[in-house]
Image (cartoon, rainbow, N blue to C red):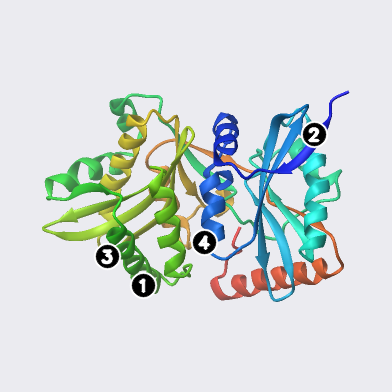
């Protein structure tokens, strides 16, 4: 008989070894993402599932606090072989115990699974309900990096290809950086961009701590487009496993075109690292991909580089208290107010 145990993992080496050998994997279940959340003052749990003393699954749980109460969140996890759902059941059981100790009123799992009926059914059978709103992106734009640079260029939209080649002729150069001064510059630029475009950011310390921790292990870099000593645009990119992730971007006013050579340099750096896929992060859903939608511009920008859309299953909530339904009602109300304000649903 196979003996199954769940233990908290306190050693970075076995955690990262399992995470990086998992397919797919994500920096959101990495050891450093746990450290980042600790730096933000959140409680975390690094659960390891062992079968006959062999590590077969991991789950990073993060405690979030709301006005209504606490909940536990597993970002893009857990990681294990989905052909063995007994592992998932073990993680859910232990997560419920932790939730009780932390006075959490629900669990939120956000797995790396494609949006298909069979994957939704896995969670439905276990009492989960799809979350009201997504946490991580659901519709991601991915680009395979296994073609040559010339082939990648030829697959791009004509305008995209032109701007990649034209901006450097105007004196725009792209630099990659691991300096803390640059992440501080980025946060200032991001706040300026947010004010101009009317979107909400995390506190500046969120980006600074994230970069400080992940950049030490070469898992995060800043790319900046510069001309005449002036920074026009910046991007923050994570590198983990076989994927690069475009996480944050900002630019000065009327310098959006500088983002094209930045993306091209990111793609080339990802190829130099031997990565297989570039994740542009989120794009608007196909049904809303039309001029006038607030997400149309950046979605068109990302799609212009070629690639394909991949839709992940929505985050799944497991209610543990009647309080969850009050939380769910507040989430629906927030979405409704956003629709009234903007004219569009968030998703």
What separation in Å lies between label 3 and label 4 (alpha carbons)? 30 Å
Badge 2 density bin: few <14, some 14–19, many ≥20, Cα 10 Å: few
Q: Secondary structure at mark 2?
A: helix
Q: Locate residue 290, reporting x and y percent.
A: 49, 54
Q: Nearer the viewer, mark 2 or mark 3?
A: 2
Q: Say whether disc 4 or disc 2 marks the residue closer to the N-terminus.
A: 4
- Look at discs 1 and 2 and give the one toward the viewer: 2
- Dividing the picture into quadrants, the one containing residue 324 is bottom right
Q: Which residue is mark 4?
A: 39
SS state under label 3? loop
Q: Nearer the viewer, residue 133 or 301?
A: 133
Which residue is denoted by mark 1 in the rendering? 196
- Quarter holding residue 331: bottom right
Judged from the image, the secondary structure of the residue bearing numbered disc 4 is: helix
Q: Quadrant of residue 144?
A: top left
Q: Give the CA distance from mark 2 to mark 3.
A: 48 Å
Checking the image for residue 252, the label placed there is 3
* Residue drawn at x 74%, y 71% as measured from the top left: 69
- Labels 4 and 2 touching (C-beta < 8 A): no
Whole-number angstrom distance, CA of label 4 to CA of label 1: 30 Å
Of badges 4 and 1, nearer the viewer stands: 4
Q: CA distance from mark 3 to mark 1?
A: 10 Å
Q: Position of residue 58 (x, y in %)?
A: 67, 40
| Disc 2: which residue | 85
Question: Considering the image in quadrants, where does the C terminus appear?
Answer: bottom right
Q: Is residue 300 left or right of residue 27?
A: left
In percent of width and height, residue 6 lies at 77, 41
- Do callouts 3 and 1 mark residues in contact (Cβ within 8 Å)? no
Q: Going from the N terminus, do you reach mark 1 or mark 2 first?
A: 2
């Amino acid at each position: 008989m196979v003996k199954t145990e769940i233990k908290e993992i306190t050693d970075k080496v076995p955690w990262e070894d399992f995470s990086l050998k998992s397919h797919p994997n994500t920096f959101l279940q990495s050891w450093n993402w746990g450290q980042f959340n600790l730096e933000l003052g959140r409680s975390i749990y690094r659960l390891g599932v062992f079968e006959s003393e062999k590590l077969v699954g991991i789950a990073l749980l993060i405690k979030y606090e709301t006005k209504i109460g606490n909940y536990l969140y597993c970002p893009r996890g857990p990681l294990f072989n989905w052909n063995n759902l007994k592992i998932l059941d073990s993680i859910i059981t232990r997560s419920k115990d932790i939730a009780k100790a932390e006075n959490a009123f629900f669990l939120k799992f956000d797995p790396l699974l494609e949006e298909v009926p069979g994957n939704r059914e896995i969670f439905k059978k276990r009492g989960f309900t799809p979350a009201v709103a997504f946490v991580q992106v659901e519709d991601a734009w991915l680009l395979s990096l296994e073609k040559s640079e010339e082939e990648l260029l030829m697959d791009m939209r004509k305008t995209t290809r032109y701007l990649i080649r034209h901006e450097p002729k105007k004196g725009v150069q792209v630099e990659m950086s691991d300096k803390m001064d640059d992440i501080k510059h980025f946060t200032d630029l991001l706040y300026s961009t947010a004010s101009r475009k009317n979107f909400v950011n995390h506190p500046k310390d969120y980006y600074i701590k994230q970069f400080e921790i992940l950049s030490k292990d070469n898992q995060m870099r800043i790319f900046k487009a510069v001309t005449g000593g002036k920074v026009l645009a910046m991007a923050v990119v994570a590198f983990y496993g076989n994927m690069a992730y475009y996480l944050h971007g900002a630019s000065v006013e009327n310098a959006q075109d500088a983002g094209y050579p930045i993306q091209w340099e990111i793609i080339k750096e990802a190829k130099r690292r031997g990565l297989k896929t570039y994740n542009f992060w989120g794009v608007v859903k196909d049904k809303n991909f039309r001029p006038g939608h607030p997400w149309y511009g950046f979605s068109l920008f990302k799609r212009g580089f070629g690639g394909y859309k991949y839709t992940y299953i929505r985050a799944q909530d497991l209610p543990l208290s009647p309080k969850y339904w009050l939380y769910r009602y507040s989430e629906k109300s927030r979405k409704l107010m956003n629709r009234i304000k903007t004219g569009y649903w968030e998703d």
